[in-house]
Image (cartoon, rainbow, N blue to C red):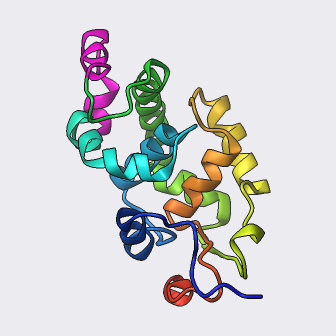
């Protein structure tokens, strides 16, 4: 039996995200970094929490400016840990800074992070054909490979499940259900 729409949305914010951002290809490095941060911050939490704190994170994290974040010192991290508008987890805040530094290293190596990350799929989005939410995987061989490579480069909070969610968020995979009105938008 085919579902008529993606059923993971439980809030208006999630529905707006689903309709306007989820599974839509993104190639701007700043946006790619923002989504990497959001997915990293989500570890162990719901996506609704992340979306509710997104504006607070945008403000607290220098509008996701990679260069600025890469230079955050301990005093700045301590201030962030007091900010109730973001995810206040010491390990994630430390990972935010070190991941920004590693992100910049990839930019230097590849020219852009976009070339690096989209290179895992030869720059062609994967269009899946799921009929039910339960059919959708939490990981894939590609998310496994991305996770392994990012970890090897020193990134934190980049397990395969987070990497698969990241692939969905930046449109590397189109996981809208076949019956969803947005399924063919990215084809």
Could you say which quadrant of the image residue 152 lies in? top right
Name the chief secondary structure element in magenta. helix
Residue farthest to the front?
10
Give the tally of numbered discs. Answer: 0
Q: Position of residue 63 (x, y in %)?
A: 23, 43
Q: Position of residue 146 (x, y in %)?
A: 67, 47
Would residue 3 be found to the left or right of residue 84 on screen? right
Which one is nearer the viewer's eye here, 181 or 36? 181
Up-down relation of residue 99 to residue 134 (above or below): above
Could you say which quadrant of the image residue 132 lies in? bottom right
Would residue 125 be found to the left or right of residue 10 on screen? right
Which residue appears at 47% of the width and 70% of the height? 25
Would residue 88 be found to the left or right of residue 62 on screen? right
Which residue appears at 32% of the width and 44% of the height? 53
Up-down relation of residue 83 to residue 44 (above or below): above
Which one is nearer the viewer's eye here, 66 or 164? 164
Residue farthest to the top?
75
Up-down relation of residue 119 to residue 30 (above or below): below
Q: Which residues are magenta?
A: 65-82
Which residue appears at 58% of the width and 66% of the height? 172
> What quarter of the picture does the N terminus occupy?
bottom right
Q: Is residue 38 magenta?
A: no
Q: Position of residue 138 (x, y in %)?
A: 71, 55
């Amino acid at each position: 039996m085919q579902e008529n729409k993606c059923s993971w949305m439980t809030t208006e914010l999630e529905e707006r995200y689903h309709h306007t951002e989820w599974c839509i290809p993104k190639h701007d490095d700043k946006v790619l970094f923002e989504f990497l941060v959001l997915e990293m911050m989500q570890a162990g939490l719901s996506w609704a929490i992340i979306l509710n704190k997104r504006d607070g994170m945008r403000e607290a994290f220098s509008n996701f400016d990679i260069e600025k974040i890469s230079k955050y010192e301990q005093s700045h991290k301590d201030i962030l840990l007091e900010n109730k508008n973001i995810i206040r987890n010491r390990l994630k805040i430390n990972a935010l800074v070190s991941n920004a530094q590693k992100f910049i290293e990839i930019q230097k190596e590849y020219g852009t992070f976009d070339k690096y990350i989209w290179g895992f799929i030869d720059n062609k989005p994967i269009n899946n054909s799921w009929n039910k939410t339960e059919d959708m995987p939490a990981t894939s061989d590609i998310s496994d490979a991305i996770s392994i490579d990012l970890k090897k480069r020193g990134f934190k909070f980049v397990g395969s499940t987070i990497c698969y969610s990241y692939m969905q968020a930046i449109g590397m995979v189109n996981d809208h259900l076949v019956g969803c009105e947005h399924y063919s938008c990215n084809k």
